[in-house]
Structure formats: C-alpha cells, structure tokens
Image (spheres, rainbow, N blue to C red):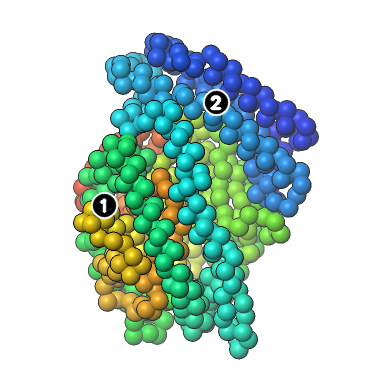
Amino acid sequence: MIWDLSQLVDDTNPSWIVEKLEAMVREALRLRDMYYGKIGGLDSGGLLDLLQQGDELTLEYEGVTLYCRLIYSANSTDEVAKHLNDASRTALVKVGQALAFIDIEVGKLLAGNPSLLDEPGLAEYRHYLERLLMRVPYMLSEAEERFAIAKDKNGINAWSQLLGDWLSTRMFEIEVDGVKKRMSYGEIIGLYESPDRELRMNANKVVYEGLGRDEIVWASAVRSVCADHLQMCEFRRYPSPMTQSLVDNDVDQKTLDSLMRTIEGNVGLYRRYLRLKAQLMGLKKLANWDITAPLPNIPAKDYTWEESRRIVTESYMGFDGEVGGWIDEMYERRHIDAEPRVGKRSGAFCSRWLSGRSAYILQTFNGMRTDVNTQAHELGHAVHDYLGSRHQRPSNFEIGMCIAECGSNLGELLLTDRLLSMAGSREEKQAILVGVLDGFGMTAFQVSARVFFEQSMYDAIKQGRFLDGETVSKLWIAGRDKIYGDAVEWLPEMKWEWTMKPHYYIPNFRFYNYPYVFAKLFTFALYRLYREQGRAFVPKLKALLAAGSSKSPAQLAAELGFDITTEEFWGKGMRQAEEFIDTLEVTF
Ligand SMILES: [Zn+2]
C-alpha cells in the first residue's frame, strides 16, 4: 500500500535532484535564447522542430518534478520533501516564465499563415495548433498580459483566498451524541454523510447559518469577480461571458445548449429517483440533508486491500485483457499509495507519468465501499494515461475537463457491474445502485443547477440589477428549483448554498461546471454503447482514450458515429441512468 517513487528518478539523492531541476531551467533558457522573437520567421520544418524540442523538455524532466510533488503529497511534514517540492515549484515557475512567449509567437505565426495547419509534416500537431489559433483573437499583448497577472495577484485573486481562509479558520458549535462540540469546517461537513438523520440536518443548519451571517462579504466578492470577468471579456473581445470556458474546454455553444436542454428535459427522471430513494429511506419526501445520505441499515461491508485489488482488477479484466494487465501492473509495480498517514494530502488523485508510460495514484484506503470506488476511479485515469502515453506526444495530452473524466467514470461503471453481479442480498444491491445514482445525480443534475445559476447572474448584471446577498440567493434558488422542483424539502438556510462554492470566487475560471455534466453523461452514453455493442465497442473506446487532446470532443464522438450537438446523443446517457433506476425499482 506504499508507493515506490524511486522509479521516477535515476538517483533519489536530494542534491542530484536539485541539480537536475537546475538543468531543466538552463534548458528552458537555452530554448528561449534560440527562439525568442524569431518564431515569426519559422517555416513548417522549423516549427516542427520547436514543438518537438518542447515535448522533449517535458519528457526529460517530468520524472524529477513529479517525484518532488509526489513525495510531498505523501508526507508534507517531511523536511526533505518540503524542500524538494519548493525547489521544484520554483524551477517550474522559471520555466513557465521563460517559455511563455512561445504560445504568443506561435499564435501570431499561425494567424498570419493559417495554411501551416495543413502542412503534412505538422499533421501530428494539427489540433494542438488549431486550439492555439483559436485563442489568438482574444490574446492581449505580452505587456498587457503581464500587467493583468501582476494586478490580479494582489487584487481580484484575494477573494478566493479570503473564502479559503474563512472556511479554514471558522469553528462551528454542534451537539453530537448529547455532547456539545466545536468543529472546524472540514470536520463538520463530514457529518453531512452521517447515518444519523437529525445530525445531518443540524450540521447543514449550523454551517449555512454561519455562512449567511457574512452574506455581505460573499455578495461583495461574487459581484466583484463577475464584474471583473465582464471587464476582461470586453478587453479580450470575448463575445459572451461563456466564450473563455468554451475555448478552454474545446467545445462549442451548440453542444453546450443541447447538453443543457437534455438535462432540463430529464429532470423528471432525476426526481423519480429522488422519490424512490425517499421510499427506501422510509420517508415521505427527501430533505436536502438526505440527498446523498447513506441508506439506513446498509450491510456493513469492509474490504481488505487484497480484496479491493482483486475486484477492481477483475472489473477491468472483464472489459479488456490489455487494460486489465495495466491495472495489475499498477499494483504490482507499487504505483499506488493507499496507506492512511499523518501529513498525507487528503482526497485522491492520479498523476500521469508519460515518459514512464504509466501513472501514480494517491488515495487513503480505509476499506470502505467508497474507497474501492475511488480506487476504480483513479485507475481509470491511469488507463487513460497508459493509452495516451503510448500514442501521443505531451502536447497532445493536455486533456480538457470534458474528456479527462471519461476513463475514470468508465472504471466506476465497470466496478458497479462487477459488484452488482457479486451482490449477495437485496440490500447490498440497493446500496450499490444508490451509490451510482447519487453520484450521477450530483454530477449531472446538481452541477447543472450551478450552470443555470451562474448564467443568471450575468443576465441579471446585464439587466442592471444590483447583486446583493438576497438577490443572489433568489437566483440560486431559481436554478436549484429548476432541477429539484418539489421533490426535495430545503432548509431555509440553504439559500446560502452558493456562498461556499470556491469556484464562484476564482477569476478566470468561469463556467467550470458544465464539463462535469458533459463528462458524466458522455461516459454514461459510451457505457450504454458498450452494453449494446459488447466486444466490438472495446477497440473504439480505447482509441478514444488513446487520442488524448489530439482531437476535439466533437471529433472523438464523430468517430464513434455520434453528433454531440444533438440531444439524441446525450439522451443515450440518460437511458443508461434510467436503466439503473429501473433496476433499483425492481429490488423493492
Ligand atoms: Zn477523476
């Protein structure tokens, strides 16, 4: 359960590592000397050379920077890890600064000579260059970009820092099992998933009451961040507040519109599930503190590390032998750190290791069903990395958020399949299905409420409305009700739910939400196709994951014979969810 990071570097001696980081910075400066101000004069051969050198730089030094980041994630209290992580981050900032000119100069070169995109020698980089070209009309000058970064650093960026500081320093008072306790935000939100219904309700009440008390701060922050974005849209000539996000995620408005229409058209399906869950919990109606709560009386099921490894590997093996082999390799070569440990980063992640054609995973394994699910999820990211590193250069592996969660979501579905086939009792089956459907509901539907909400704030500003706390809350409730209708009872304090979502405070990261909806429905649709076509679909799905970012999500779907600008495609994902709901209903 402890990973072996020594494979990432030739030598784990800190002085060797620091020397390697220094060499990385020297190499970046060498590239800068060679190309700064000269990219405009390159022909296709010269451009290819530059792009390849950039990719080689990534591959050569990826192992050492990854090593520094991962030893720190595994134990942030370790002095050597702290030192190396810091040295690595500093070196990476220097490299980023040294090479920032490349995108700007290549963008200008392409804008002046778009036929370069059709050069056969550059075919491998075609979509990478197309995406760069797409950004050119919205780029500011290098001086203006630098100015904006410097101003934001001590200006608009401070709001998200403030929210983070507020949440991490606040203490909440709550009674647990008859004892009054003072809890941090991180602790009290853990009670949202408690089997004790009243405790779940109280935890929600206490947190949102507290957040609502400072509404004046949150409304002020959200107003400023939105206004700043609209101002930047004007400077950058973005036609709408959504454009930056669409460009970043490599999708178009038409696709997004049909995705959101599919959500709106299927809220009835989600509400049907919520009513079923209420029945399972013995309630007339779910309250907001029940939406993701565990079922009462679920059979306790603890998994050992060995069991989890076997079940997860079998899930992938049943899909494809080669993929199953990679999963086995991840365990066998000790690329997973799962031991609970003080100083270890919370949560879970998978880091690609392109030059090693593999990946590393960090999680904290406590033997719960959710831990097995997390393992299957992160290993799905690893499968994506195994395929991508065998077929793409690093430049073609900057996967947008819409596609990045495909391998992982697929892994969870394969595990679900396996667990359902193994389930011994009706209750166990219900717990598995509720786990999948709660996840689907939160990602596809709850996140959609946030998309509607965010859009409505920009519409309100456009109409000249002043966004005070109560007005923002009304907009949030309108977006929320569009999804939940009367299927859920809400605490009045939940009108402040928008206040704690960190993303609303992050400038230059607007509309981060719909890619989650996209990824969830996209994977459910792919899984549906796999169920329909069986074995014949496996190579197609592997090709999709192997493509990395060398093709747009629309192209990837088109190669499977689908048009993501139509509701018909997204409906396929909904039908898969419906099948899970039907299966749940017959267990009653
Ligand atoms: Zn993920």
Asked if 51 appears above or below 10 in the picture, the reply is above
Whether residue 271 can be seen here:
yes
Quadrant where the C terminus is found in the figure: bottom left
Q: Which residue is mark 2?
A: 98
Q: Quadrant of residue 169?
A: bottom right
Amino acid type of the residue tagged 2 in the rendering:
Ala
Choose mark 1 or mark 2, whichever is in front.
Answer: 2
Dot 1 or dot 2: first in sequence order is 2
Whether residue 411 can be seen here:
no
Disc 2, SS: helix
Dot 1 and dot 2 residues touching (CB under 8 Å): no
On the image, the x and y values in percent for residue 340 come to 68, 60
Write the residue at 63% across / 86% down. 179
Write the residue at 39% across / 58% down. 222
Asked if 360 appears above or below 206 in the picture, the reply is above
Q: Is residue 409 left or right of residue 571?
A: right
C-alpha span from label 1 to label 2: 40 Å
Q: Which residue is mark 1?
A: 259
Asked if 460 appears above or below 565 in the picture, the reply is below
